[in-house]
Image (cartoon, rainbow, N blue to C red):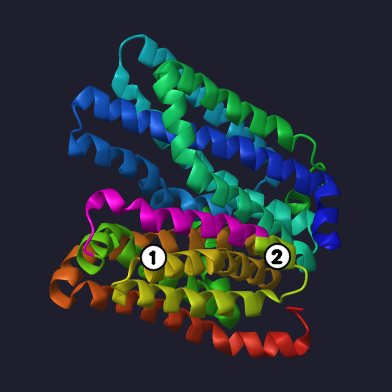
């Protein structure tokens, strides 16, 4: 507990957490404002709404790995700060276009910001590697997870409130200001160390060569390969059940659609409390054990949710699996941070992000078809199998790591 709280006095940790709070605020206000504005202007046109998701997710596949390569080339602090500033500038430019009468410009706010995030995110992980000790990585990841959990629950409410109270223009202004404050918070972290690459290597390798080198690095590291496979399997599992929550309420519980909050609220509460509990225990529990526990319990919780026909049992399962869901991401990311050399952290992050997102989107697209073919309970059992397969994938590297004392 004291070790976890003492990290908050670390100038870098405090700055990056504050930066993330501002960034998450801007992202959620922007996302909800763009969604509600598009629905208002088009009368709820499905194509227009779907284009928002395209603008948000397409850059992950197109730029994530490239952003990781440049994160390993560029100075990470400058990269993150410049990305936040450019995001703010793009939002203000979109605001100008919107004020001039071109409401479709709001889509560009999501697209440009999402592209820049693919460069900022791996650079942020590289900053962690530079300024945080490996044994403290899990605590820092848990702090970030708390922020993510809070905004996952409160973000939609916050974004809807801002748009409903003040409209699109003030929402864009707040978004741009939040990104600028995020960049301002980062200026308090230690300066980037002097770059020596130019002196050590007169001829820089090509972009494709660096990308291939990153892929070879992950392939040659069995632990990273297994952790990445685990990440993808979790993505498959999450994607399978994400579109089917409503059917749990209507088919398994026999309730009307208005009762959906009975299972979403316990999930949101469980994730927030779980993030805080993981933060408090991060210094005491090995990340490998945290990851294993999260995978096993989440699989069991999903299986119970798919089979339960009793409301209280479904609510309890949702709370428990959400409570330990942060453990999966915190444990996995902490292990990756420990296993990855600083020179490759950007590329490893750039490989893993589209891997999980792609698996999740692919399984989301198949969820309805599988439900018709297997039944709702069958799909939830398949999602459970994905989580337990992820546990089996990481079991081999967990035991040697624990025996060497790397995860204690």
Which residue is the site of mark 2? 138
Q: Where does the image place residue 33, in percent across and percent down from the top left?
A: 39, 28
49 displayed left or right of 212: left
Work out which quarter of the rendered image holds the N terminus and state it. bottom right
Residue 393's spot in the image, x, y percent? 49, 84
Residue 257 is one of the magenta-drawn residues: yes
Provide the major secondary structure of the magenta segment. Answer: helix
Q: Would residue 201 be visible to someone looking at this image?
A: no
- For residue 348, which quarter of the picture? bottom right
155 left or right, relative to 281: left
In the rendering, at what x and y percent does residue 213 appear?
Answer: 56, 67
As rendered, which of 35 and 248 lies closer to the eye?
248
On whether residue 371 falls in the magenta region, the answer is no
Q: Which residue shows up at 50% across the image and 64% down it?
A: 322
Kindly report the distance in space between the C-alpha atoms of the residues bearing marks 1 and 2: 22 Å
Residue density around tag 2, few if under 14, some if 14–19, many if 20 or more, within 10 Å: many
Placement of the C terminus among the 4 image quadrants: bottom right
Q: Residue under circle 1?
A: 238
Is residue 29 positioned above or below 97 on the image? below
- Examine the rendered structure and indicate whether residue 364 appears above or below residue 115: below
In the depicted view, which residue is nearer to us: 189 or 70? 189
Q: What x and y, as percent, mark residue 77?
A: 71, 42
- Closest to the observer, 303 or 108: 303
Point out the stretch of residues depicted in magenta: 254-276
Q: Are marks 1 and 2 in contact (CB under 8 Å)?
A: no
């Amino acid at each position: 507990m004291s070790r976890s709280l003492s990290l908050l006095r670390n100038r870098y940790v405090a700055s990056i957490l504050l930066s993330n709070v501002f960034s998450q605020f801007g992202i959620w206000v922007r996302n909800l404002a763009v969604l509600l504005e598009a629905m208002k202007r088009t009368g709820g046109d499905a194509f227009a709404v779907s284009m928002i998701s395209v603008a948000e997710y397409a850059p992950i596949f197109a730029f994530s790995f490239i952003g990781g390569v440049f994160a390993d080339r560029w100075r990470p602090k400058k990269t993150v700060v410049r990305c936040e500033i450019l995001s703010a500038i793009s939002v203000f430019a979109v605001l100008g276009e919107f004020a001039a009468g071109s409401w479709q410009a709001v889509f560009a706010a999501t697209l440009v910001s999402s592209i820049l995030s693919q460069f900022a995110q791996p650079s942020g992980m590289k900053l962690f590697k530079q300024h945080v000790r490996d044994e403290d990585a899990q605590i820092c990841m848990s702090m970030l997870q708390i922020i993510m959990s809070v905004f996952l629950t409160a973000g939609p409410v916050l974004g809807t409130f801002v748009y409903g109270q003040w409209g699109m223009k003030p929402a864009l202004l707040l978004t741009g200001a939040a990104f600028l404050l995020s960049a301002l918070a980062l200026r308090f972290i230690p300066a980037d160390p002097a770059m020596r690459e130019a002196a050590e290597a007169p001829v820089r390798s090509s972009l494709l060569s660096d990308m291939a080198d990153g892929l070879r690095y992950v392939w040659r590291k069995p632990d990273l390969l297994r952790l990445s496979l685990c990440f993808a399997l979790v993505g498959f599992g999450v994607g399978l059940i994400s579109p089917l929550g409503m059917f749990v309420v209507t088919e398994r519980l026999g309730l009307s659609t208005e009762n959906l909050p009975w299972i979403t609220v316990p999930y949101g509460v469980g994730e927030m409390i779980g993030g805080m509990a993981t933060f408090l225990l991060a210094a005491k529990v090995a990340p490998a054990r945290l990851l294993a526990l999260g995978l096993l319990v989440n699989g069991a919780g999903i299986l119970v949710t798919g089979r339960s026909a009793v409301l209280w049992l479904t609510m309890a399962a949702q709370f428990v699996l959400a409570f330990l869901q942060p453990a999966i991401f915190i444990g996995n990311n902490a292990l990756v941070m420990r296993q990855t050399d600083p020179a490759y952290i950007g590329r490893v992050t750039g490989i893993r992000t589209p891997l999980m997102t792609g698996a999740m989107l692919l399984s989301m697209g198949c969820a309805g078809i599988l439900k018709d073919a297997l039944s709702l309970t069958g799909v939830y059992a398949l999602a459970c199998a994905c989580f337990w397969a992820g546990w089996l994938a990481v079991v081999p590297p967990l035991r040697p790591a624990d025996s060497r004392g790397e995860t204690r």
